[in-house]
Structure formats: C-alpha cells, structure tokens
Image: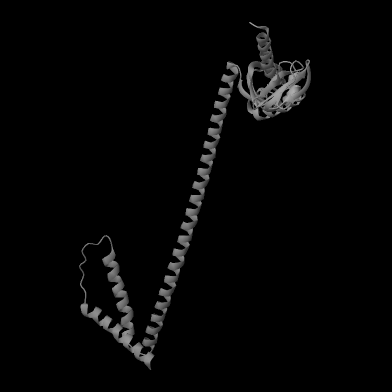
Amino acid sequence: MPAPLIIAAVVAILAVFLIYKAVVIVPQGENWTLEAFGRYIGTLDPGIHFLIPFYQDIGAKLNMMESVLDIPSQDVITRDNAQVTADAVSFYQIINAADAAYQVRDLERAMVNLTMTNIRTVLGSLDLDEVLSNRDDINARLLTVIDKATNPWGVKVTRVEIKDLTPPADITEAMARQMKAERVKRAEILQAEGDKQSAILRAEGQKQGQVLEAEGRREAAFRDAEARERSAEAEAKATTMVSTAIAEGDVQAVNYFVAQKYVEALRDIAAADNQKVIMMPLEASSVIGSIAGLSELSKAAAEKARS
C-alpha cells in the first residue's frame, strides 16, 4: 500500500476519534460533570456540547430526576425495650451534580446507611404504642433529619415513608387480646348507655301518660260538676215555678212533683239488673192526669211570660 494512502487512513481515523472525543450529547434528565486533567471545571446540561480532546473529559454521569431508594428492613429496639422490624422507602433528587459527584462516594449506599441509622434513632426514642400509632410523625422527623444531613451532598430528600412496622408474634397476640378487650368494653358501655336511655324514655313516657290521665280526669270532673250545676239550676228554677204556682192556688203544680217522682221510680225499677219481668198494678189514668197537669202548668207559665 502506498505511503500516502496509509497516511490518509491514519488521518481519517484520527479525525473520527477526535470528533468522537470532542462532541458530547447529554440526554434529557441528566447532568454530566466536566473535568480537565482530572479536575472538575463545570457541569454539562442536556444537549450537545463540544470538548477539547485530550484536555477535557467527562467525569460523572448523574440522573437529575427524582429517584426512589429502598431501605432494607432492620430490627429496632423501642424505648420500652420492644423489638420492631422496620423498613422504609426514600425519595430523593439530585439538585447539584458537582456536590453529588465529589462530596460523597457511592451516594445511594451512603443514603441507605444514613436512613437506617436515623430510623433506629427515631424509633428508639419512642414507646411501642407511639411507634405503631404515630407513623406520620415518624416520617416527618426522618425527612427533616435526613434532608438536612444530605444537603451537603447536593441532594434534596422529598419523602421518607415507613413501609412496614412488624412487632414480634407474642406482642402482636397481646395487642390483639387488648384490642378485643377494648372492643368488648366499648360494646358493654354502649349497651349500658342504651339501657339507661331506654329506661329514661320509658319513665318519661309513663310520667307523660300519668300527667295526661290526670288532666283528663280533671277535665271530666270539671265537666261533671258543670253538668250537675246546670241540672241543679234547672231543678231550682222548676221548683221556684211550681212553688209560685202552688202559692197562687194552682193544683196542677202539685201533680208536677207527683208525676216526676212517679216516672223516676218506674225508670229505676225498669233499669234494675235483677229484674227481668215486672208486674204491678198501675193506674194509667193517674199517670195521664199527672202528665196533663204538667202540660197545663207549662201553658200557664207561657201565658204569664207573654203577659
């Protein structure tokens, strides 16, 4: 092969290599650090960039999107010496590529260990009941502590969530018995409250019934007294009229009283329960005469009223 061709080939290969080393395309969602002879000189954003071959080179390639980090489960001793198995998940985002690349080695491993340590610290300061019932508070405390600790690493921790808290089997069984006892207690309290309310309502109903019954009796007594009063007034008026008639010499007035008592006696005899058949001699003419006397007395009273 002629020497010019060899030189041309070498030049072409060198040109391709230089272009490959000089042109860099950073994908969306990533930042790459730029180094000059191993020293950090800048950060490349997404897009195309041109480097100086052999002088500039790519350092770390970092994903700037929010990422999730699984925290392995671990056994934690609470303040009241109860053992709990806890695991978690952490969400973080790199906000400074240079700090994430050069301030810590193996960022994810460092964050995992930091989170596990703080989980032990936070759960160890609480009693078992507080650990199981205050998960939101635990998450908030972990987020505050971890975010502050990772800030020099160019990382923003957005969320830390406890996924599972598992106490030992004997504690779980004891908690189940306690929960059952509490539910039975609440049921008995509710039943007692219901019985109490029912008794109160029955008493109130009886009281109201008695009040209404007394009101009815009072009203009936008032009506009876009023009826008797009116009857007595009518009887008094009738007696006054008859007495006046007798004083004036009217014999029919005497027949009025006789007929009235006669009719009342017959009514009482007929209304008796122990009498089925009544046989007695009656002078029909006497009764008719008495009734006629009543008629004459009524006419006389009417004539006097007109006069």
Image spot of residue 189 (x, y percent):
55, 35
In screen coordinates, is 109 left or right of 218? Answer: right
The single residue placed furthest to the top in the displayed view is: 1
Image spot of residue 251 (x, y percent):
32, 87
- Colouring mode (rainbow / by chain / secondary structure / one colour): one colour
Task: Tell how many labels.
Answer: 0
Asked whether 213 or 281 is in front, the reply is: 213
Toward which corner of the image does residue 303 lie, by quadrant?
Answer: bottom left
Image spot of residue 283 (x, y percent):
21, 77
Asked whether 278 or 23 is in front, the reply is: 23
Name the residue rendered at 74%, 19% in the picture: 101
In screen coordinates, is 25 left or right of 197? Answer: right
Q: Where the C terminus falls, by quadrant? A: bottom left
Toward which corner of the image does residue 13 lie, by quadrant?
Answer: top right
Name the residue rendered at 56%, 31% in the picture: 185
User: Can residue 125 be seen by looking at this rendering?
Assistant: no
In screen coordinates, is 274 left or right of 92? Answer: left
Task: Check the image and report above or below for 82 versus 148.
Answer: above
Task: Check the image and report above or below for 211 versus 120.
Answer: below
Q: Where the N terminus falls, by quadrant? A: top right
Task: Check the image and report above or below for 267 versus 31.
Answer: below
User: Can residue 225 be seen by looking at this rendering?
Assistant: yes
Toward which corner of the image does residue 252 lie, by quadrant?
Answer: bottom left
Name the residue rendered at 66%, 8% in the picture: 6
In screen coordinates, is 217 left or right of 139? Answer: left
The single residue placed furthest to the bottom in the displayed view is: 307
Image spot of residue 132 (x, y percent):
63, 25
